[in-house]
Amino acid sequence: MTTPVIVVIQSVAYGKTFPLRIKLTLVPITLGVFLNSYYDVKFSVLGMAFATLGVLVTSLYQVWVGAKQHELQVNSMQLLYYQAPMSSAMLLFIIPFFEPVFGEGGIFGPWTLSAVIMVLLSGIIAFMVNLSIYWIIGNTSPVTYNMFGHFKFCITLLGGCLLFKDPLSVNQGLGILCTLFGILAYTHFKLSEQESNKSKLAQRP
């Protein structure tokens, strides 16, 4: 649900307009993701509350990533350079409430060499993921970034089925087809929009 929420936030808070055909592409994408996940997820009130908060926070974060890059006139690396220390400082206050601080498995407990290497690798991968998020959103839009995410979701399911023989139900197959159809339609409309804008610029004296 992150993609439609982003559209709502950008429309209401930032006055951005989306063509009707772009909005309609969200219908098969949302339906496809729903078909893929509905039969694998157990619903509860607490889970719905956390999921709703997660969608809102993720949507706001992605909108702000794009908005701040344009507002401050910075690139993805510069924005990440300023954001990462603040995130680390915030996490330092939160970690003690959720993870042990001292003793076995604690931050200040004994660390094996393999654990140190895995943490460093995890940090490097997280840095690259964040940088790619900032770069894609900064050069395209939060909605386009979500299209990448949906495409990755479909490829993951198909890869698991083809490479590891994971079972793929009929509903999941239909969900993948719906999602891919929506992604292809969105891509087609965005490319057509870009070509139209280039033509208008070329016609200007």
Image: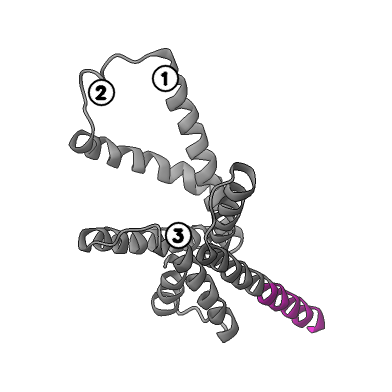
12 displayed left or right of 179: left
Provide the residue designation for mark 1: 116
Question: Looking at the picture, how far across and down is residue 61, in whole percent?
Answer: 40, 58
Question: Relative to residue 115, is residue 184 depicted above or below?
Answer: below
Spatial separation of the CA atoms under disc 3 and disc 1:
31 Å
Work out whether mark 2 precedes mark 3 in sequence or the reverse, and give the earlier one. Answer: 3
Residue 102 seen in render: yes
Work out whether mark 3 precedes mark 1 in sequence or the reverse, and give the earlier one. Answer: 3
Q: Nearer the viewer, residue 157 or 167?
A: 167
Q: Amino acid at mark 3?
A: Gln
| Mark 3 secondary-structure assignment | helix
Residue 173 figure quarter = bottom right
197 displayed left or right of 17: right
Spatial separation of the CA atoms under disc 1 and disc 2:
13 Å
Provide the residue designation for mark 2: 106
Give the residue at x 35% y 43%.
87
The crowd level at tag 2 (other Cα within 10 Å; few <14, some 14-19, many 20+) is: few
Tell me the chief SS of the magenta region. Answer: helix
- Magenta range: 188-205
Provide the residue designation for mark 3: 62
Residue 88 figure quarter = top left
Q: Amino acid at mark 1?
A: Val
Which mark identifies residue 86? none
